[in-house]
Amino acid sequence: MRESEFWMLMSDEFGDAYAQMVAGTQHIGALDGRTPTEALEKGIPPRRIWEAVCAHMSVPEERRLGRDRPLRRGPIDE
């Protein structure tokens, strides 16, 4: 998972503003007491951070993959 995907999932689940607040204020035991933002800065993989956020914030399994989005057409698909 890329960091951009992490932020997309955070926004999908919490909304843009609240996602930033959660990332900056929630100290998560599974991340050694770091906030998600601190964990990203330390180089912890975004997938691991997202899984820790989901567990900490009780995100249901069915919402952990984010919203369904339509496929984007590219030069190969045309």
Image (cartoon, grey):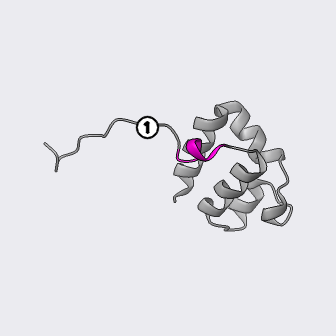
Label 1 SS: loop
Q: Is residue 46 above or below residue 53?
A: below
Counting from the top left corner in percent of width and height, residue 10 is at 63, 42
Which residue in the structure is indicated by mark 1? 68
Label 1 Cα neighbours within 10 Å, binned few <14 / some 14-19 / many ≥20: few
Q: Is residue 65 above or below residue 34?
A: above
Of 72 and 57, the residue lying toward us: 57
Counting from the top left corner in percent of width and height, residue 41 is at 71, 62
Counting from the top left corner in percent of width and height, residue 61 is at 61, 47
Query: What residue occupies the far left of the structure in this picture?
Result: 78
Q: Based on the displayed image, in which of its 4 quarters is residue 40 positioned?
A: bottom right
Residue at left offset 85%, top offset 53%: 27
Specify the segment rendered in magenta: 60-65
Verify whether residue 68 appears in magenta.
no
Residue at left offset 53%, top offset 50%: 4
Is 51 left, or right, of 5 in this rendering? right
Residue at left offset 13%, top offset 42%: 78
Of 68 and 19, the residue lying toward us: 68
Q: Based on the displayed image, in which of its 4 quarters is residue 34 positioned?
A: bottom right
